[in-house]
Image (cartoon, rainbow, N blue to C red):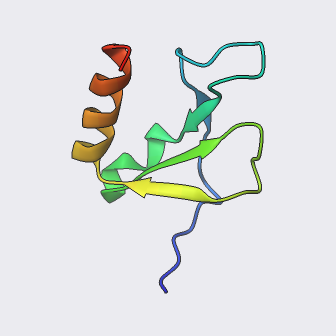
Amino acid sequence: MSTFDLSGARWEKSSYSSGLGGECVEFARNLSPSGIVPVRDSKSPAGPVLLLTPAAWSDFVAFAANDN
């Protein structure tokens, strides 16, 4: 298994995340030049992180925007 350094990640909460404890997605856009967009559950910041390609992140955002 390979590792990815997330120490410089600047986590942003998605605009689709509510303040009521549901749908809390955070991402670190500042790492996308490396070819990776880290995504995590803001309720569990020490938990697992998905590492998406910028294309996969774009697909994810488009899917979420369509309320699917």
Query: Image check: 41 left or right of 50?
Result: right
Query: Where in the figure is residue 4, as x and y percent of width and height?
Result: 51, 70
The answer to whether 58 appears left or right of 43 in the picture is left
Pick whichever, 56 or 29, lies toward us.
Answer: 56
**Nearest the camera: 11 or 18?**
18
Q: Position of residue 5 (x, y in %)?
A: 56, 68
Position of 35 relative to 13 (above/below): below
**Nearer to the camera, 35 or 59:** 59
Number of numbered discs on residues:
0
Q: Quadrant of residue 64?
A: top left
Q: Residue at x 65, y 41 (%)?
A: 41
Query: Which quadrant of the structure image shows residue 17?
Result: top right
User: Considering only vertical position in the picture, is 44 above or below 3?
Assistant: above
Identity of the residue drawn at 47% across and 83% down = 2
Q: Quadrant of the C terminus?
A: top left
Provide residue 24's location: percent of width, then percent of height.
65, 28
- Location of residue 59 by image quarter: top left
How far from the left and from the top, in percent, is residue 1? 49, 86
User: In the rendered view, does 13 fall on the left or right side of 3?
Assistant: right
Q: Is residue 51 above or below residue 68?
A: below
**Looking at the image, residue 66 lies above or below residue 54:** above
Identify the residue shown where x is 27% and y is 34%. Answer: 58
Spot the residue most to the front.
68
